[in-house]
DNA sequence: AAAGTATTTGGCTATTATACCAAATACGCC
DNA sequence: GGCGTATTTGGTATAATAGCCAAATACTTT
């Protein structure tokens, strides 16, 4: 595999990796309904606000979110909304996994 | 967030996390064209064969791949092919990121 | 300008992930 | 059964990640 191809896979994997954390995935999915300020996530997620802020930074650096400061608050929104299209298939994977377990019980 | 919802996000994130590694993503994408034996990956990827085997195990445990032993070889294939549908959007994220950088240069 | 709220950043630690090597296992062939 | 090839498993060193706390920064209000 040449250097360029390698770099491309690294970049693509980085995007998926950013979504590969429960808190980050949750936040990204919430943002599908529209922008949210950090404070809202802080209220509903049981984690230190610094932790939440860092997770949002990771999503931003991955190119998934963008932020805007308005007054005291920072609002985050999806930069490329299609990124959550794949979630129905992720759920299909979970369903398939469940089915496999059931089959084992037969 | 209740316990059940939390568990669901953890499970969904785990699927994305499994794809969030360059080697694993590469292998998953290759399998979109049909099954492959481990030996083929060993030939084309510059990593120890034990490393490749472990990456395949991670994809299998995530429910993305399934394997079948035939003779000396083990063949892997996509269990839920739609899982790669999202890749066009991942590429859109990369393109968008590139555009943002260009905009900075203006 | 002091005080209060929202968010980010730095620093530390514990946990998890990755990669290699060596050894074990599985299978087919002679 | 012994040998060669393919793959997995175990062990270990190193690197990356996640979370918390404390401190810094940014903005608003008084």
Image: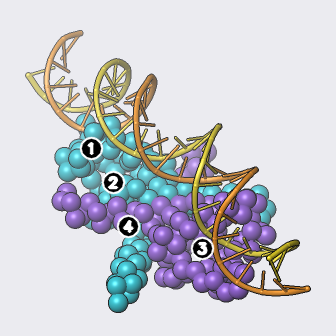
Chain colours: A purple, B cyan, C yellow, D orange
Residue B13 drawn at (x, y percent): 57, 60
Q: Chain of mark 3?
A: A
* Residue marked by disc 2: B23
Q: Chain of mark 1?
A: B
Crowding at dot 1, Cα within 10 Å, few <14 / some 14-19 / many 20+, comes out as: few
Q: Are marks 1 and 2 in contact (CB under 8 Å)?
A: yes
**Distance between the alpha carbons at the discs numbered 4 and 3:** 17 Å
Q: Are marks 4 and 3 in contact (CB under 8 Å)?
A: no
Around disc 2, counting alpha carbons within 10 Å, would you say few (fewer than 14), some (14 to 19), or many (20 or more)? Answer: many
Residue at x 46%, y 74% (from the top left corner): A63
**Residue found 54% across the figure and 80% down from its top:** A66
Q: Is residue C14 left or right of residue B56?
A: right
Q: Which residue is mark 4?
A: A12
Q: The N terminus of chain A appears in which quarter of the rendering? A: bottom left
Q: Quadrant of residue A7?
A: bottom left
Of residues B37 and A22, the one drawn nearer to the viewer in this rendering? A22
Q: CA distance from mark 4 to mark 2?
A: 11 Å
Disc 3: which residue: A28
Q: Which mark is residue B47?
A: 1
Mark 4 secondary-structure assignment: helix
Q: Position of residue C26 (x, y in %)?
A: 34, 29
Q: Which of the two labelled residues, at mark 1 and mark 2, occupies the earlier sequence position?
A: 2
Give the CA distance from mark 4 to mark 1: 19 Å
């Amino acid at each position: 595999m040449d250097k360029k191809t390698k770099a491309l896979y690294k970049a693509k994997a980085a995007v998926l990796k950013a979504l590969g954390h429960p808190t980050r995935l949750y936040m990204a999915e919430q943002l599908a309904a529209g922008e949210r300020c950090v404070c809202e996530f802080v209220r509903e997620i049981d984690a230190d606000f610094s932790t939440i802020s860092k997770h949002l930074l990771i999503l931003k650096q991955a190119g998934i979110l963008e932020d805007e400061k308005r007054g005291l608050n920072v609002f985050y929104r999806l930069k490329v909304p299609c990124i959550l299209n794949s979630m129905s298939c992720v759920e299909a994977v979970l369903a398939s996994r469940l089915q496999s377990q059931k089959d084992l019980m037969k």
